[in-house]
Amino acid sequence: MRSARLTFAYRPAVVLVAHGSRDPRAAVSTEALARAVRRARPDWTVRASYLDHDGPRPLDVLAALPGRRVALVPLLLTAAYHGRVDLPAVIREAEPLPLTVTATDVLGPASPLLLAALERRLPGNDLDAVVLAAAGTRDDAARATVAEAAAALGRRLGLPSAVSYASGPGARSGEAVARLRAAGARRVGVAAYFLAPGLLYDTAVRAAVEAGAVTAAEPLGDAPELVRLIGARAEAVLSEPLPVAA
């Protein structure tokens, strides 16, 4: 019994770090994703955490995982402010804990698994154009990666594609749909570059439909390909040799 407890205590842990939202649907979606990762990798301890709004916070989750190797997986599709600032801050704050914590790359922009998840969520197979709708950011480099994902999705589907943002600079979803329709497309679909539902997702879908989009995807949620991508990100970190103490 004692050895079983020790094995559990020291097995690898994966902490998913979501942005968090006032919309309760977002936390429900994130917890469903955590459960899916847990089912896929029962040899890991998998926990969800939130940078804002919801709890628990990443540091609180890490503090409950003593003596473990931890992969911190940001549930982020771009390396904007949260990826560049918030996550490194979490790792710095965790330094006094008896843990080895390493953050993985963000999930975007255009890995084959992420593109497959976007395609899975997109209803209909008779589209003639697609808009990739994203939350938006003021970070130019992050926006460029979303545009890259939109172009890659268009190539994967063999369709003209456009990118849109629900906030910040860049075209809104309604504008992107209107431009594609003006260019001759009649059945424009909207792919959702969102991990979970919320106000910005609702805003993007509503504007696209009002502009003539015939279908809109649900957020990525717990799509099997996304679960595999998270597993691959975490595995890459957890398989690295532990640093040698000085």
Image: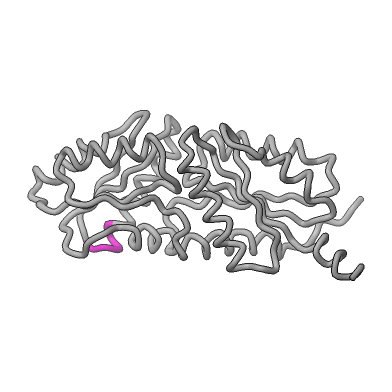
Q: Quadrant of the N terminus?
A: bottom right
Q: Tell me: residue 25, above or below residue 6.
A: above
- The percent coordinates of residue 158 (x first, y second) are 23, 63
Residue drawn 61% across the image and 34% down it: 85
- The percent coordinates of residue 153 (x first, y second) are 32, 57
Q: Quadrant of residue 167?
A: top left
Asked if the magenta segment contains residue 156, the reply would be yes
Question: Taken as a whole, is the magenta stretch helix, strand or loop?
Answer: helix
Q: Tell me: residue 240, above or below residue 207.
A: below
Q: Tell me: residue 161, above or below residue 225.
A: above
Left or right of 50 in this view: 113: left
Q: Tell me: residue 165, above or below residue 240.
A: above
- The percent coordinates of residue 222 (x first, y second) are 47, 58
Nearer-the-camera pick, 39 or 147: 39
Residue drawn 72% across the image and 62% down it: 240
Asked if the magenta segment contains residue 23, the reply would be no
Residue drawn 48% across the image and 49% down it: 29
Left or right of 180 in this view: 104: right
Residue drawn 58% across the image and 63% down it: 231
Q: Quadrant of residue 164?
A: top left
Nearer-the-camera pick, 227 or 137: 227
Color style of the picture: one colour
Left or right of 14 in this view: 233: left
Left or right of 152 in this view: 74: right
- The percent coordinates of residue 68 (x first, y second) are 80, 56
Residue stretch rendered in magenta on the structure: 154-158
